[in-house]
Image (tube, rainbow, N blue to C red):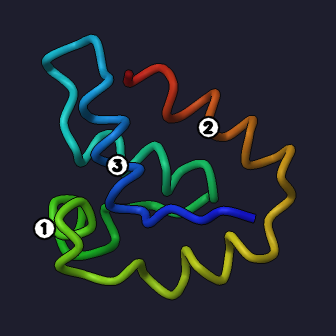
Amino acid sequence: MKQICLGTIITLIYQSRTRSADTIKSMCGGIFAAYDLDITSYNKELSSHLKSGHDSVPVELIFTARIANIDCVAEGIEDNLIPSI
């Protein structure tokens, strides 16, 4: 399976958005929400640090992603991330 870093995913999504009002934080919030995590419980700079590769992905997101049901994640992405792009 091919893997891509979270920072690259965030950058690709951010660059492909159609609305200029969207922020990196809202897109990261959508990614975290797809895994039932709240990005606001982390450092306020986390979104931009993830995009730049400055910070590692939080352990909670890694753990949750490893055990998550793919159908639930897909639904979470449709509900939380897609509307923001």
Identify which residue is drawn at 66% across, 62% down: 2
Identify which residue is drawn at 14% across, 20% down: 21
The three-letter code of the residue at mark 2 reads Ile
Mark before the other along the chain sequence, 1 or 3? 3
- Of badges 3 and 2, nearer the viewer stands 3
Q: Secondary structure at mark 1?
A: loop
**Image quadrant where one finds the C terminus:** top left
Q: Which mark is residue 10?
A: 3
Q: Secondary structure at mark 2?
A: helix
Considering every residue shown, the one lying at the far top of the view is: 18
**Residue 71, percent across and down?**
86, 44
Give the Cα distance between marks 2 and 1. Answer: 22 Å
Q: Which class describes the residues within 10 Å of circle 3: few (<14), some (14-19), or many (20+)?
A: many
Answer yes or no: do the residues labelled 1 and 3 have beta carbons within 8 Å? no
**Image quadrant where one finds the N terminus:** bottom right
Give the Cα distance between marks 3 and 2. Answer: 13 Å
Answer yes or no: do the residues labelled 3 and 2 have beta carbons within 8 Å? no
Viewed as shown, does residue 6 lie left or right of 76?
left
Identify which residue is drawn at 36% across, 51% down: 28
Answer yes or no: do the residues labelled 2 and 1 have beta carbons within 8 Å? no
- From what the image shows, is residue 56 above or below residue 37? below
Give the Cα distance between marks 1 and 3. Answer: 14 Å
As rendered, which of 44 and 50 lies closer to the eye?
Answer: 50
Q: Which mark is residue 77?
A: 2
- For disc 1, the marked residue is 45
Q: Secondary structure at mark 3?
A: helix
